[in-house]
Image (cartoon, rainbow, N blue to C red):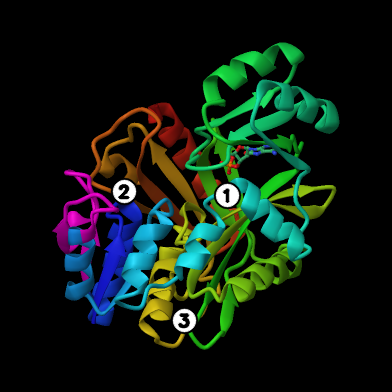
Amino acid sequence: MKIGILGAGQLGRMLALAGYPLDFDFVFLDPATEACAAPLGTHIKADFDDERALQEFCVSVDVATFEFENVSSHSAEFVAARIPLYPSPRALTAGQDRLHEKKLFAQLAVPVPGNIAVSSLDGLRLAVEHLGLPCVLKTRRMGYDGKGQAVLRATEDLAPAWDKLGSQPLILEEFIPFEREVSCLAVRAQNGEMRFYPLVENVHRDGILRTAIPTGNDPLQAEGESYARRVAEHLGYVGVMAFEFFVSGGKLLANEIAPRVHNSGHWSIEGAECSQFENHLRAVAGLPLGSTALRGASAMVNLIGSAPSTPALAALDGVHVHSYGKTPKPQRKIGHVTVTAPTREALMARLAPVKALVERHAQ
Ligand code: AMP
């Protein structure tokens, strides 16, 4: 079976690596010259809204998916009118606008931080009066890895934040002094069957994910699964969906969904019976889903900006190196390592020196 992927970054690359053993071939559409998934399939180098390229993409594959969630709804509809596209355009667009996304969560009785749409500096002042300081101003669209947002701590912060972000529609959110951040990775098959990975505990710095550790027996597992199920069923979702939450007062508050495989699930390549990448492909191709159970203990550490040498990392106990073949650049995700161990205690002992080494190189 030929699978088309819109986007050819590291997520596409890891999807292809998971797909070859299942006898899938891959076609990627991506405008980047140095797209890091390109060596793993056919690369159609074109913009996501280039209809001639999209047509070529559609005639060369049996089924399509995406690894980049900012594909326009027009392009997604164009593809879905010609070949099966999973998740559907509706599921893709549900998370593209933070305001609509939060409204959807609230409609499904999934708790969210207080939030208000903002479209002028006066509107921002009123919204801040309503929500109180501190709060977080975000662009409604196209934000990722902490880009397109500003934390407002004092009234003097409002005008500079408006100058930086105000050319686009914005959302102001209550600042959540969270105890933890967790994500629930769910996979839904074409027949509606769902499976859930154990909740993952995520640590961000400067808005970028640094470490992700599956928890195994998290007290919030059932709550996370029930919220993810509500959203996935409402959207008729097919594939892997990542749902990011804040834990506040021991309860989950929804931050956002990603309609794709997600950085907080990379540990599953070594750490789960069936990885998020394989399960996504299984769902998209109509195969039975694989087990989401843990294989021992594991943790993922991102390589950001620059990384220790592969030999230095590979020399450490339990370390599995994933280098994406990307040119190093500050704040850019260029790879990750998964650390595995038979028990949580052994994992923590192995993780500490890995984190220290990676941190020394991060940019
Ligand atoms: P986002 O792009 O919305 O996922 O935000 C990136 C990171 O910024 C999150 O993972 C949090 O660490 C932090 N953040 C975002 N929104 C809030 C909020 N309302 N309260 C506190 N921290 C936040």
Disc 2/disc 1 C-alpha distance (Å): 17 Å
Q: Classify mark 3: helix, strand or loop.
A: loop
As drawn, is 133 to the left or to the right of 101?
Answer: right
Residue of label 1: 348
Answer with the quadrant where ligand 1 appears in the image.
top right
Residue 199 place in picture, x, y as percent: 63, 62
Q: Earlier in the sequence, mark 2 or mark 3?
A: 3
Disc 2/disc 3 C-alpha distance (Å): 28 Å
As drawn, is 120 to the left or to the right of 238?
Answer: right
Amino acid type at circle 1 is Met
Decide which of 50, 46 is in the foreground and name it.
50
- Image vertical order of residue 142 relative to residue 5, above or below: above
Amino acid type at circle 3 is Gly
Residue of label 3: 290
- Read off the magenta span: 26-51
As drawn, is 126 to the left or to the right of 325?
Answer: right
Residue drawn at x 52%, y 88% is 191
The reply to whether the C-beta atoms of the residues labelled 2 and 3 are less than 8 Å apart is no
